[in-house]
Amino acid sequence: MTSGLATPLSVDHWTDISPIRRGPRARISTAIARRIFFRVAERLGVSVSLGDTPEPGAEPADLRLILPEEFFARVGNDGLIGFGEAYMTGAWEADDLGEVLTVLCREIGDLVPMWMQRLRAVYVSRPPRRQRGSSRNTRKNIAHHYDLSNDLFQLFLDPTMSYSAAMFPADSITGGDGNRTLLAPPVPGSDLAEAQGRKIESILDAAGVTAGSRVLEIGTGWGELAIRAARRGATVRSVTLSSEQQSLARARFADAVEAEGLRADLVQVDLLDYRAVEVPPGSPGFDAVVSVEMIEAVGYAYLPSYFATIDKVLAPGGKVAIQAITMPHERMLATRRTWTWIHKYIFPGGFLPSTEQLDEVTRKHTSLRLAGRTTFGSHYAETLRQWDTAFVAAHQEVLDLGFDETFRRLWHFYLEYSRAGFASGYIDVQQLTFTRGPDAEPSPDVEPSPDVEPVETR
């Protein structure tokens, strides 16, 4: 059996990883974590082994605690952040990481006893102020993730370089309220590039993008949506805060101009905060505003200013189509002030809204009204599964780019952790369409104080 606090990976330079605490309080929290962990594992049917070498003749365990003392110390002191960090350092392992995480995500609201949930405000970490989605902080938040390396993303994304949920072929069911469509789960292994194209064409259709449309894209990605809108004959202004994405998106559009004969003036990609977008001189505004999975970087307190900006630049009769990762409303209210492993290592300043919150914010602060939505969370689970498969297969190429083994484990955990969220139904993804209410007037600019949050629905 392997034990102790030494780690099998070199993580000394990973200064963000919390040190293992010692002392009476740490011993108590470690003991509590050990007790709760084994109770949860037994209740959920997750088999656990201690050490890296299985007992002779034993069935492989679902989860192996390579360094048990470190694992419980990290979980005891830092909860789910410690759980993720323990995987980064090699303190635990799972042959099917995604399945183990999916089982845990299905029960995430009940993993700890009720008495601990009542004390949540005392022991959970709070988001640092430096990561709030203000104009001052947002560029750094975006660069933390999207400016890592274009070469890294090219290792696991499909040729469209789409870094958002794909939409695979699937039957659809119209919801009882008449404006919601649910897509059935996709067939595993379906073509990813084709599904990404379908997703983009779907959101362009929802926004009514045709020849001559003036389109604002908030969050460029690597340019695929702008290129496809240009193929329809639309004029696109795309804004991003990632210099890496801007560079590659411009290069990809230039290639499309040369290869397909597109007009070179159809797409403009600017390094610009969404709040700084203005209506073009002499123009009534943009006929369509589209944004694919950028709203998650806006932040709870800044949703009013995000939608007010869109409302201000939208032309009369224009449409808004947004692809957003969402979570149930009550869960959003319970976790919106919690700093998570994803915030610490992947998306600083990130926030997942609920549909109810988006509907309330637009009604309260804008003339926009939610007109329709398509939900397809199971499609994101399949998208992430394919991304992770490609990422794991590119193990050596990741190391060749200068990333170490700890980063590789971090990224693998991130992709599988995210997949588990969608596979379990804990989070969802939707394409939402907004139009102007018949009697609504565009609202004035909204910029909340960094210390004030907007009204919430309960």
Image (tube, rainbow, N blue to C red):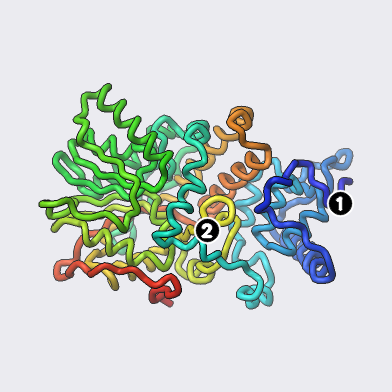
Q: Secondary structure at mark 2?
A: loop
Mark 1 highlights which residue? 4
Instruction: Judge left or right: residue 134 versus residue 32.
Output: left
Residue 275, how many percent across, how many down? 31, 58
Q: For label 2, count other residues whose C-alpha is less than 10 Å away and answer few (under 14), some (14-19) or many (20+).
A: many
Query: Considering only vertical position in the picture, is 330 above or below 392?
Result: below
- Residue lying at the far front of the rendered structure: 136
Q: Residue at x 34, y 37 (%)?
A: 223
**Position in image of residue 383 (x %, y %):** 48, 41
Q: Total marks drawn?
A: 2
In x, y percent, where is residue 136? 42, 59
| Residue type at tag 2 | Tyr
Q: Is residue 383 above or below residue 113?
A: above
Q: Residues within 10 Å of mark 1 (few under 14, many from 20)?
A: few
Left of 80 or right of it: where is 222?
left
First along the sequence among labels 1 and 2: 1
Name of the residue lying farthest toward the top: 259
Which element is circle 1 on? loop
Residue marked by disc 2: 426
Residue 393 in view here = no
Identify the image quadrant of residue 212.
top left
Q: Nearer the viewer, residue 434 or 271?
A: 271
Task: Classify residue 286 as left or right of residue 165.
Answer: left
Q: Report the Cα–Cα distance between label 1 and label 2.
A: 34 Å
x, y percent for residue 185: 45, 45
- Circle 1: residue type: Gly
> Residue sitting at 33 percent across and 34 percent down?
250
Residue at 40 percent of width and 75 percent of height: 457
Of tags 1 and 2, which is closer to the observer?
Answer: 1
Contact between marks 1 and 2 (CB within 8 A): the answer is no
In which quadrant will I find the C terminus? Answer: bottom left
Q: Nearer the viewer, residue 447 or 46?
A: 447
